[in-house]
Image: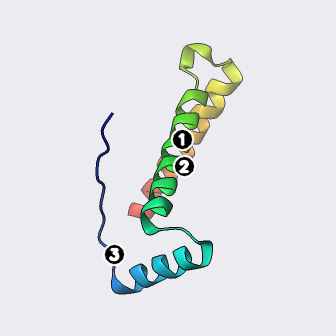
Amino acid sequence: MGLRVVSTKLTEEEHTKLVDLCSRTGTTPSSLLRQAVMEKISSESETKTKEKSPDEMSLEELWELCLEKERSKNSLNSQIS
């Protein structure tokens, strides 16, 4: 399995903060960014595996999901207005 390069652009201020953090923690920007990316991927994977399909939910869970979506929709509509 080969390695792939991922890059990003930072402002001078952001870069300075990154370099300072790396200096304080004794790591490199590459390893710090790789760790952050992998933690995010792992977190997202765990979230997706924990989600149930509607067929797996109880009536109470389905009702709560409907209420949550309705609240979210109402909140979005009020922000638009």
Disc 1 residue crowd, few under 14, some 14–19, many 20+, Cα 10 Å: few
Q: Which residue is mark 1?
A: 42
- Res 10 quadrant in image: bottom left
The mark total stands at 3
Disc 3 residue crowd, few under 14, some 14–19, many 20+, Cα 10 Å: few
Question: Dot 3: what SS?
Answer: loop
Q: Earlier in the sequence, mark 1 or mark 3?
A: 3
Q: Residue at x 48, y 43 (%)?
A: 41
| Vertical comparison of 48 with 72: above or below | above
Label 1, label 3: how far apart the Cα atoms are = 24 Å
What amino acid is at disc 2? Glu
Label 2, label 3: how far apart the Cα atoms are = 20 Å
Q: Residue at x 65, y 33 (%)?
A: 64
Q: Nearer the viewer, residue 15 or 63?
A: 15
**Most extreme residue toward the top, as rendered?**
55
Q: Which residue is mark 2?
A: 39
Mark 1 in CB contact with mark 2 (< 8 angstroms): yes
Q: Position of residue 39 (x, y in %)?
A: 54, 49
Question: Dot 1: what SS?
Answer: helix
Which quadrant, please, contains the N terminus? Answer: top left
Q: Is residue 16 left or right of residue 11?
A: right
Question: Dot 2: what SS?
Answer: helix
Q: Earlier in the sequence, mark 2 or mark 3?
A: 3
Q: Nearer the viewer, residue 35 or 11?
A: 35
Label 1, label 2: how far apart the Cα atoms are = 5 Å
Q: Position of residue 30 (x, y in %)?
A: 42, 62
Q: Residue at x 30, y 55 (%)?
A: 6
What amino acid is at disc 3? Leu
Q: Which residue is mark 3?
A: 10
Q: Nearer the viewer, residue 19 or 12?
A: 19
| Vertical comparison of 22 with 50: above or below | below
Q: Position of residue 58 (x, y in %)?
A: 68, 18
